[in-house]
Image: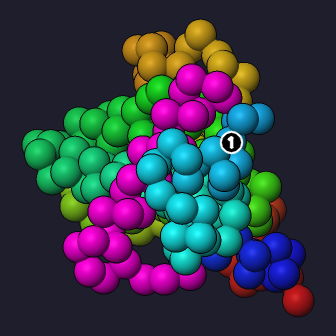
Amino acid sequence: MARRQQITEIKRRIPHQARARDTVETIFEAAIRILRREGLDALNTNHIAETAGISVGTLYGYFPNKQAILVAMARRELEKTEASIRAAIARSASGTEAARAAIRALIRGFGGQNSLRRDLLQAMVVNGHYAELARPAENFARLMLKAAPGQFANMSVGLTEPQAFVLTRALVGVIRAAVFENSTWMGTDALEDELVRLAQSYVRSVASGLNSIGGQGGPRSNQAPR
């Protein structure tokens, strides 16, 4: 796994200068055009370079292979999604309103332009970066409880690490399944409603102590097994 992650590191060259950033953007735009018109099977570094109007040697100065390009594009989309979630929470007047707005941003971030997002998400999974897919949702959970204490499902304390893991993976898992399965529910009010219900119900159960299912001895330890 470590070797694969090394092979698919985003960039060989850090694009600090404006010209370098423009080159990276041109590579991304070329890859998007190919994915939309011809599909993932047609994507390769030679085709990307030709479509971008650059030499393949120039492309290799930034990315070692097409998988690295896809991972870099996916990470950029995840950053945009996280920014949208932060903005949605900041604009909301209540915890419940913020939860719905943030979940809507999460759905749009993963589900817009389905075939393209599907390719980018798959690249993250194939190259061992699955945990990164949950990062926007993890930050949503933490921001939600920090921004509106006592307003979201009467929650006055934050989630523990295991609780945050369960909630965020549940949200991301449903959305990811909808994207990969090309579900007709993607982008509908019905899916949004159910994800809001899932988040609120889970947090409400934590707040009321229903998460303490360790039996009469009280809640189980939050420590990871040794």
Q: Residue at x 59, y 10 (%)?
A: 184
Residue 165 percent across, percent down from the top left: 62, 62
In which image quadrant can residue 38 be found? top right
Residue 86 percent across, percent down from the top left: 25, 55
Residue 137 percent across, percent down from the top left: 48, 54
Q: Which residues are magenta?
A: 12-39
| Residue 70 in the image: above or below residue 190 | below
Q: Quadrant of the N terminus?
A: bottom right
Q: Nearer the viewer, residue 26 or 1?
A: 26
Inspect the magenta stretch and tell me whether residue 139 lies in it.
Answer: no
Q: Nearer the viewer, residue 48 or 164?
A: 48
**Residue picked out by circle 1:** 43
Count the labels in the image: 1
Residue 22 percent across, percent down from the top left: 30, 63
Q: Residue at x 15, y 43 (%)?
A: 92
226 left or right of 78 in image: right
| Secondary element at image label 1 | loop
